[in-house]
Image: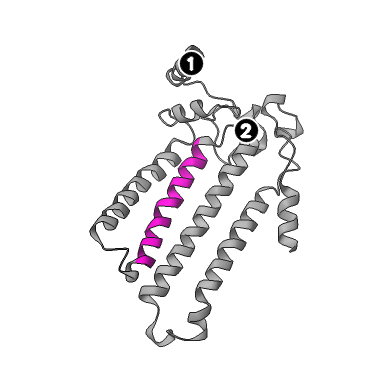
Amino acid sequence: MGAGATHLQLAGAAILDGKMVSRKSLASVFREQGILFGYRHPRSSATDCVFSVFQMTNETVNIWTHLLPSGYFLWKLFTLLFAWDVWNDPFTWPFLTYMATCCLYPLASTFAHTFSTMSSQARHICYFFDYGALALYSLGSAIAYAAYVFPEEWIGSTFHHCYIFVAVLNTVLSTSLSCYSRYGGGAVASTGPHGARPPPEFAMPPNLVEQWFSTFLML
């Protein structure tokens, strides 16, 4: 209890102090093109990450521009759930699926931008979820389109029957390829600017899942 309270106090003090990490001291996996300052420590704890939401960092705008819309979409989704007889009206199901993905992808992006500085592996995993949620949003859009606004002359056609299947395939492939491409710079991510190695605590740990993606794409 005492240790937890002390950590919260230190995290709060860090917010007030506004201390950030120099871009030059970071491994390239943590650096963003065109962003020169405002970087959080690449070994932040979960508590530090949560506190940083209320601090002006290079991720503050990203976090809040996803967090606020996700709250709005959640409110709209629950409003519809209470207003409609969703259990007995299958016509509403595609729209509710679409609304659920509208809530999911900004929430996943909020999560990714908030906790991506816990470690380099955590950063990759956070953005894997971000890519997956965005791909699911495209699937939700396809489901709603097929159910409500598909061109009348195409309804019942082969294209109509294959539309959702293709959308699912696109979701799986786009997520897998996006995640795999994130490891394309793994070979250079362990070095700092001008080839200099960053401090050990800032360096990128060995790639642990690249082989999994390679195997998956070869299936």
Region in magenta: 93-114
Q: Is residue 183 left or right of residue 166?
A: right
Q: Return the x and y of residue 66 as percentages of the image width and height.
A: 41, 45
Q: Which residue is label 2 attached to?
A: 119
Does the rendering let one see residue 199?
no
Question: Which amino acid, mark 2?
Answer: Ser
Distance from the alpha carbon under mark 1 to that under mark 2: 19 Å
Q: Residues within 10 Å of mark 2 (few under 14, many from 20)?
A: many
Instruction: Please say if the residues under marks 1 and 2 sit with CB atoms less than 8 Å apart.
Output: no
| In magenta segment, residue 113 | yes
Compared to 154, does 136 lie above or below?
Answer: above
Q: Quadrant of the C terminus?
A: bottom right
Q: Secondary structure at mark 2?
A: loop
The residue positioned 75% from the left and 62% from the top of the image is: 218
Q: Which residue is label 1 attached to?
A: 10
Q: Is residue 86 left or right of residue 150?
A: left
